[in-house]
Image: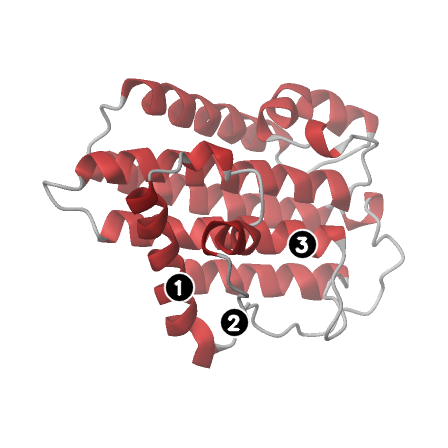
């Protein structure tokens, strides 16, 4: 699985729920989707630049980006189901803890036990491994695959529970467009990789930016307008 596959599943989610935004518009839900998608797409690039001399940088970069992906995906969950949580409460730690109760309260279905187990597994692997700084590149690749599977499972969960979401009235799905235009993909990837490396060069801790959308973090870091996303 790769970012193209994730984009395909996201397009299917849009088609099934009617959540695709009109051209030129943005809502908090779509901003949260763009945020976790941006962080997720950085993960394989971080692994791809790994060498014996950069393995520490890879670890220090991968885990904050991975957890930011999960945090923003949790925000998408909260916004999709209109949970009465503040922005500070929209994080993956809280969602992992309360997910079983939320499924009961909001009558959510479709393999909730398996999704809850995936939440706990990813949470434990990312937090524990980040603290130990002992993960090998192969382990990070396996973790990336687990994150990809989790994202797909969550998108399917959204689609299957549309009746309990803010899109409950949608009845006639239409085919959605890809999230990133193919002609822009290489430009976008070069920009994101430059963002990762620039953060390391200037010595800013990744955890200070992992809560914000990546394009906003890039602007704050080098003071330029990103016109490609």
Question: Where residue 151 sits in the image (x, y, percent)?
Answer: 52, 46
User: Real-space Cα distance between discs 2 and 3?
Assistant: 15 Å
Mark 2: which secondary structure? loop
Question: Where residue 142 sits in the image (x, y, percent)?
Answer: 30, 39
User: Real-space Cα distance between discs 2 and 1?
Assistant: 9 Å
Whether 38 is drawn above or below 201: the answer is below
Residue most toward the bottom? 183
Question: Where residue 184 sits in the image (x, y, percent)?
Answer: 46, 76
Pick the front one: 152 or 140: 140
Cβ–Cβ under 8 Å for marks 2 and 3: no
Residue most toward the left? 52
Q: Earlier in the sequence, mark 2 or mark 1?
A: 1
Whether 211 is drawn above or below 50: the answer is above
Q: Earlier in the sequence, mark 2 or mark 3?
A: 3
Mark 3: which secondary structure? helix
Pick the front one: 91 or 171: 91
* Dot 2 alpha-carbon crowd within 10 angstroms: few under 14, some 14 to 19, many 20 or more: few
Question: Where residue 27 sits in the image (x, y, percent)?
Answer: 76, 57
List the residue tagged with mark 2.
Answer: 228
Pick the front one: 46 or 159: 46
* Dot 1 alpha-carbon crowd within 10 angstroms: few under 14, some 14 to 19, many 20 or more: some
Cβ–Cβ under 8 Å for marks 2 and 1: yes
User: Is residue 218 visible to the viewer in this orientation of the structure?
Assistant: yes
Q: Is residue 180 left or right of residue 48?
A: right
List the residue tagged with mark 1.
Answer: 191
Q: In this rendering, which labeled residue sits more in front, label 3 or label 1?
A: 1
- Quadrant of the image occupied by residue 9: bottom right
């Amino acid at each position: 699985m790769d970012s193209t596959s994730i984009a395909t599943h996201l397009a299917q989610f849009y088609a099934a729920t009617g959540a695709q935004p009109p051209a030129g518009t943005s809502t908090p839900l779509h901003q949260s989707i763009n945020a976790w998608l941006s962080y997720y797409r950085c993960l394989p690039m971080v692994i791809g630049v790994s060498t014996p001399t950069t393995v520490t940088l890879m670890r220090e970069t991968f885990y904050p980006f991975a957890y930011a992906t999960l945090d923003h995906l949790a925000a998408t969950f909260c916004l999709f189901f209109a949970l009465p949580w503040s922005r500070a409460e929209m994080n993956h730690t809280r969602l992992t803890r309360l997910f079983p109760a939320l499924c009961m309260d909001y009558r959510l279905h479709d393999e909730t036990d398996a999704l809850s187990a995936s939440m706990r597994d990813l949470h434990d692997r990312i937090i524990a491994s980040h603290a130990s700084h002992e993960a090998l590149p192969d382990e990070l690749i396996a973790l990336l695959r687990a994150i990809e599977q989790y994202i797909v499972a969550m998108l399917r969960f959204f689609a299957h529970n549309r009746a309990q979401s803010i899109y409950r009235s949608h009845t006639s799905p239409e085919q959605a467009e890809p999230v990133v235009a193919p002609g822009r993909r290489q430009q976008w990837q070069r920009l994101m990789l430059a963002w990762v490396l620039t953060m390391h060069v200037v010595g800013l801790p990744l955890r200070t930016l992992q809560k914000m959308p990546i394009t906003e973090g890039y602007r704050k870091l080098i003071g330029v307008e990103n016109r490609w996303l």
